[in-house]
Amino acid sequence: MNPKSFEKRELQNVLQILAENYDIVGPVKEGNVLKYKKLDKFEDIYLDFVGPSAIPPKSILFPQREVLFTYELENKDVKLHDLSQQKPAKIQVIFGIRPCDAKSFALLKLFFEWGKYKDAYYLEKFNNSIFVSLACNNTKSTCFCTSVGGDPFGKENSDLQLVDLGKKYVLRSFTQKGEAVLSTLKKYADAPKEDLQKIEQINNDARKSIKTHLELGKIHEQLANMWDDKIWAKFSAACLGCGSCSFLCPTCHCFDVIDDRTDERHGARIRVWDTCQFPIFTKQGSGFNPRDAKLARARQRIFHKFNYYPTNYGVLGCVGCGRCICLCPMNSDIRDELAKVKEVKTATT
Amino acid sequence: MNKLENDLKELGKKILLDKTVGKIIGYSYGTLAGKCVPVFIDKPEEAGKLTWNSFCDTNLARYIKKEIPKEGKIAIIAKGCTGRAITQLLIEKQFPREKLYILGINCAGTIDRRRIANELGSTEILEIIEKEDKILVKGTGFEKEFPRAEYLNYLCKVCKYPIPPIYDVLVGTKEPKGHIHDKYEDTLEFEKKTPDEKWAYFNETLKNCTRCYACREACPLCYCLECFCDQTQPSWFCKSAEHSEIAVFHLVRAMHLAGRCVACGDCNVVCPMGIDLIPITRKLEKIVKDRFDAEVGIDPSKPPSLSTFCIEDQEEFFEEEE
Amino acid sequence: MTTIETPIHITNELDHWEPKIITFLCNWCSYAGADLAGVSRIQYPPNIRIVRVPCSGRISPYYLLKSLQVGWDGVLISGCHPGDCHYLSGNLVARRRFAVLKDLLDFFGIEPGRVNFSWVSAAEGERFAKIVRKVVKKIQKLGPIKKLVKENPFQPNKCEAQ
């Protein structure tokens, strides 16, 4: 189907039509914080932000706290209520995420579906979601999506994309799921050719506005030879060992599983976010901790995204959103670190 | 570059050259406008990296314990609150005084960068220039001036001790800032609320907490090897971001910091969600002042308030028969 | 051996709500005082569930907070009078700790009546009963606890973003 275009003030009506068949999750501003919530009132939607939101939308499909199952003891029987079997009532449209965030959902999926045991909690929600990205007309100084294979108007994992043309929006689809959604918006006109040309022009301008250009090349091969390099100690000196970078990273997926007893006969197994940057993340039952040193954890972060992910899945594990740069309390800058890594001469450079 | 920064660089170079110290913990420029980062310098030629301005807001005292050398001394740039944290850590015997070389600085307060960023909304801060009593902020196609005094961090506005209580050398002048008679009006105003209003306030404030522990890691007085919330045997409280667990985490952390918190405000500055923890630090200061007539980190001879007792301690909250 | 029932998920046999108050009593004074009340047949409301600790100084803020989290409607902590502690200064150290905890809980908005402290000696059976009556009345007025109670995992997952 052709892309649809409509006046900006029509957005609420568009969402209203979609809401007949889907749940809508979109960005709202609560105080100073931009977050993604299920929308009941579409006038609350907030699309005037630049760059990605502070809180990543990964928490829609992978919440900080997720109950995996609950159990109840009845005499000698255990009744288990497995929440992975729960199907959401309606398909949800995740509206207004940045193209880097849309891509990040696909990167998370690579992890959650890898191997023999698939994570039903994430995959069930993923398969019941439709992703509508909001193209980036402007970028922040910390954005570097183009250095990691992305684009301000990137299409990866976007079923649909909303482009802001000033007075109008254009909604275009890239997948069959997206087509199905567009077909419910028949009352709106197809986007004229000038609109589509304007999209190209804004896209080029946005790409040019990105100030960071990293030539990463075959960084995962280079890293493979840098395990013992002195550079890791320098990167980690000021690091606090808090979870800010990981919790706000749209592609970080580590979690801990805890059992919570309500009383002698009831309880639940819950998963919560965890991060390799916590010193106790790798602490073993014996007390030994292979990543006791801060430099080991700093190294782990870079390796996981730029060596392990490419080695295991063939793609980089970073989408270049820049949240870790904006929000790190100690202003650790991953771009700086990657540039310094590239400068190091190893057997492969 | 101001004179203070110049003096600091010179002094830094000198004490590394003549081997008074083996390392300096100080501040340097970050990659984002208006952000200064901790820097660890062990070569005299690197002393040029040192900086001092109104964006040096982190409390460097947290790094001392890990950086204390086996031989020789380490230097640290200490503004008032950093110095108070150091004093409190010395009271708690966390490291020997002889290994520390404190470069005191008369701090004029740090800027609340987050407040400026919030007011600018989606406009990004690309450059910040400090003038006498104004902060000039530049973005894409835009410029705005903010009055310095108004946009200081709140705790800097009410700070009584801009100079650290102990130091080996003072960089800059000892010009007194003027002792502020702090009546804790903000805390008293808050306490006029009903319990339900207070609870609603904290629920609202804390609801974005993701349990990243940036506040705990940033705090110089949170140095436990195993934090209570990470304990598994027994597991008192769990790690999830559920409203009761979040409230309990902040409550217990406040409890553990009673009589030890120097109200530097670092926990507030580092929170990635922008949660306002100032009311809690202010209340902790007030409790200790009202009940135990104590001030944290000023007198190196006074033990922490909660590790001692007094026969005359107030017990007005105890139940009586009638 | 007393089994402490955690109050949530327990069906109430009564047709109205009655507060359940967890009570920490120091072994040497307050527990003995409570025992004296029992032996002397002094009646007091059955809403309290007693946990015996060696000294009020043993009581950690964790006990209080965990109790409120799992649904106890109130807490009562009692120890020896200052100066009479079996371990000399346990209750004096505890007094400061309780003061800070009470101030912080009030500050956070927990109703002041939920967490109570008292000094009861081994000879004060009547005093113990009076204090219990007072505390139960207080908490009956406040109603069942809602603040600080942990979320029930038996509710379905919310897909709402943080």
Image (cartoon, coloured by chain):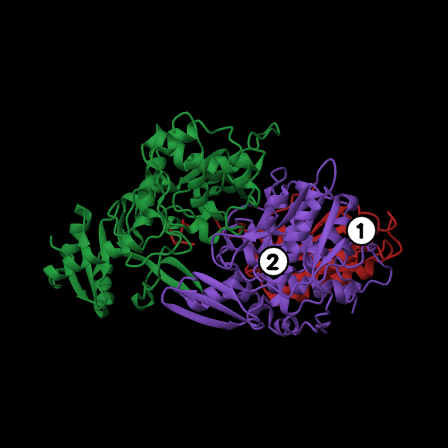
Chain colours: A green, B purple, C red
Q: Is residue C154 visible?
A: no
Q: Is residue B162 above or below residue B180?
A: above
**Label disc, if present, on residue C35 of the rendered structure:** 1
Residue under pointer 2: B52
| Category of crowding for the residue at label 2, using alpha-carbon neighbours closer than 10 angstroms: few (below 14), some (14–19), many (at least 20) | many
Q: The C terminus of chain A appears in which quarter of the rendering?
A: top left
- The residue at 45%/53% (across/down) is A326
What is the three-letter code of the residue carrying label 1?
Asp
- The answer for how far apart the CA atoms under marks 2 and 1 are is 66 Å
- The residue at 86%/63% (across/down) is B312
Give C72 or B74, whichever is nearer the viewer.
Answer: B74
What is the three-letter code of the residue carrying label 2?
Trp
Question: Callout 2: residue from which chain?
Answer: B
Give C154 or A46, whichever is nearer the viewer.
Answer: A46
Give C114 or A56, whichever is nearer the viewer.
Answer: A56
Give A5 or A286, whichever is nearer the viewer.
Answer: A5
- The residue at 22%/52% (across/down) is A160
> Horizontally, is B162 left or right of A231 in the view?
right
> Horizontally, is A226 left or right of A190 in the view?
right
Identify the image quadrant of residue B45: top right
Identify the image quadrant of residue B288: bottom right
Q: What element does badge 2 sit on?
A: loop
Q: Where's residue B35, x and y in %?
A: 52, 56
Evaluate if marks 2 and 1 touch, with contact meaning CB atoms under 8 Å apart. no
- The residue at 61%/48% (across/down) is B47
